[in-house]
Amino acid sequence: MGATEDYAEADVVLVGIPMDFTVSFRPGSRMGPQQIRLVSYGIEEYSVYQDKDLIDKKYFDGGDIALPFGNVTGSLERIEEVTAELLRDGKRPLFIGGEHLVTYPIIKPFAKQYDNLAVIHFDAHADLRTDYMGESNSHATVIRKVVDLIGGDNVYQFGIRSGTRDEFAFAREHTNMYVDEIFPALQQVVEKLQGRPVYVTLDVDVLDPAYAPGTGTPEPGGCTPREIFEAMRVLGALNVVGFDLVEVAPSADLSDRTALLAAKVIREAILSFW
């Protein structure tokens, strides 16, 4: 919806990452990028929330990264390579997952390019485990890997309502976690992060499964779409350098309301951030 056909003239480049190799419950998020694109034709390019229109933006849909299925390490390396190339080309990358582990290789080139990078993380789950069933590369370990990369003081977690006791203990000591909360904490963090480069990662299960049932690990008690739309608008006050939306699993939602919601969030993000 609303994409330009010219990569060179685009400011923002959207890339799909069809990977769900380490999911711990329901698979299917590898199909998320294509389904979100498909249903995007059903919503308007104009945002009534922001009084802005995608027709005034230049963004390019680069399609999905070709990944070696089943090869987690090889896939992570390829995701990192694609991200680095987009940054070299001066683009604002926007990624659609896929599982949440894909965020780690995305952030690695960002951390090299931007000093003092901060990460804002929306999720139902803490994702702070060191391993899941012995595997260090997992969608349950992704934010712990980000913490090891850029330092926990630079990680801000919102909407978290699920995890192990050890994960929450780690967060109290090492990250900025706002348990089961988005507002008003987000507004305070936005004021604190003024002037810094910020990467935003959003797991769709931060929303209550009443609104977003099509995800691999749904967690009751989440936020509403209105809160996420408002979060996208508020984050527009920051220097957002990259964004991903992950964990949409279309096979778990025959109504497509999760994919529709994701498409609308992506529209709001493009209009707000860039």
Image (tube, rainbow, N blue to C red):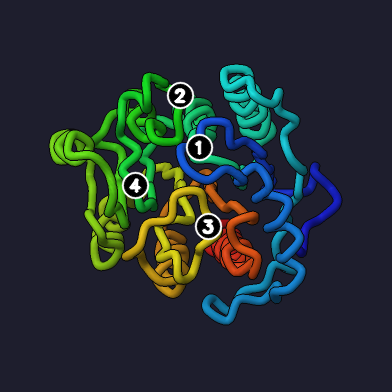
Q: Residues within 10 Å of mark 2 (few under 14, many from 20)?
A: many
Q: Point out residue 25 in the picture as x, y percentages from the top left corner.
A: 47, 42
Residue type (three-letter) at the residue carrying disc 1: Val
Query: At label 4, which amino acid type do we have?
Result: His
**Distance (Cα) linking label 2 and label 3:** 30 Å
Residue in view at x 61 percent, y 43 percent: 93
Q: In which quarter of the image is the N terminus?
A: bottom right
Quick check: 9 above or below 146? below
Q: Name the residue under label 1.
A: 23
Residue displayed at 18% across by 34% down: 166
| Amino acid type shown at disc 2 | Asn
Report how far apart the C-alphas of labels 2 and 4 lie in the structure. 16 Å
Q: Earlier in the sequence, mark 2 or mark 4?
A: 4
Residue annotated with mark 2: 137
Mark toward the viewer: 3 or 1? 1
Residue drawn at x 49%, y 34% as measured from the top left: 101
Report which residue position mark 3 lands on.
273
3D distance between C-alphas at marks 2 and 1 = 10 Å
Whether residues under marks 2 and 4 lie with C-beta atoms below 8 angstroms apart, the answer is no
Secondary structure at badge 4 equals loop
Measured Cα–Cα span from mark 4 to mark 1:
13 Å
Task: Work out whether mark 3 precedes mark 4 in sequence or the reverse, and give the earlier one.
Answer: 4
Residue topped by disc 4: 125
Q: Where is residue 211 in the image (x, y as percent from the top left)?
A: 48, 70
User: Earlier along the polypeptide chain: callout 3 or callout 1?
Assistant: 1
Image depth: mark 2 or mark 1 in front: 1
Whole-angstrom CA distance, mark 3 to mark 4, is 25 Å
